[in-house]
Image (cartoon, helix red, strand yellow):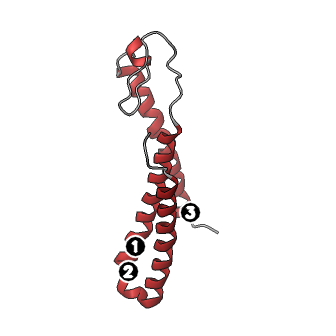
């Protein structure tokens, strides 16, 4: 069973997790400026691609390449997240840790070569 002090501390953290965002929303509603909407703010503008016409819907479809690049970035960013702790503890892990990281990197490198061969990074 949890000690009263631990339970009280958890209750305080949970209360603050609710109170702080609600207080921020209330302060913003009271002190913030009114939102001004214009046609320019509603137009599409993605990665340097200007809207094709002034008249039209802002719900224009973009190439799937944007999403593919984002997914690839996330995959290789996660790789960096796994590499950092390994590099910090490199000497403690020994040969087994080194071999495991080589296997991990070889799988990622093989995937990267596959992506290059398929032409996923070519922008046409």
- For residue 66, the mark is none
**Front-lying residue, 27 or 119:** 119
Mark 3 vs mark 2: which is more N-terminal? 3
Can residue 78 be seen at all in this image of the molecule?
A: yes
In the image, farthest residue toward the right? 1
Give me the residue at 44% from left, 30% from top. 25
Q: Does 73 appear above or below 45?
A: below
In this figure, which residue is indicated by the disc labeled 2?
Answer: 89
In the image, farthest residue toward the top? 55
Mark 1 vs mark 3: which is more N-terminal? 3
Give me the residue at 48% from left, 51% from top. 119
Q: Check contact, mark 1 vs mark 2: CB within 8 A.
A: yes
**Front-lying residue, 123 or 86:** 123
In this figure, which residue is indicated by the disc labeled 1?
Answer: 85
- For residue 4, the mark is 3
Q: Nearer the viewer, mark 1 or mark 3?
A: 1
Label tally: 3
**Front-lying residue, 89 or 54:** 54
**Which quarter of the picture shows residue 124?**
top left
Assign the N terminus to one quadrant of the image. bottom right
Secondary structure at badge 3 equals helix
- Could you tell me residue 85's position as x and y percent? 40, 73
Q: Does 67 appear above or below 111?
A: above
Q: Label 1 vs label 3: CA separation?
A: 36 Å
Q: Label 3 vs label 2: CA separation?
A: 38 Å
Q: Nearer the viewer, mark 3 or mark 2?
A: 2
Q: Residues within 10 Å of mark 3 (few under 14, many from 20)?
A: few
């Amino acid at each position: 069973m949890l000690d009263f002090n631990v339970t009280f501390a958890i209750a305080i953290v949970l209360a603050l997790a609710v109170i702080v965002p609600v207080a921020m929303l209330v302060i913003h509603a009271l002190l913030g400026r009114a939102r001004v909407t214009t046609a320019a703010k509603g137009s599409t503008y993605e990665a340097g691609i200007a809207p094709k016409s002034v008249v039209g819907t802002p719900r224009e479809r973009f190439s799937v390449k944007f999403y593919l690049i984002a997914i690839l970035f996330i995959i290789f960013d996660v790789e960096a997240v796994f590499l950092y702790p390994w590099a910090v503890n490199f000497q403690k892990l020994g040969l087994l840790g080194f071999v495991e990281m080589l296997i991990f990197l070889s799988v990622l490198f093989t995937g990267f070569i596959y992506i290059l061969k398929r032409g996923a990074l070519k922008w046409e």
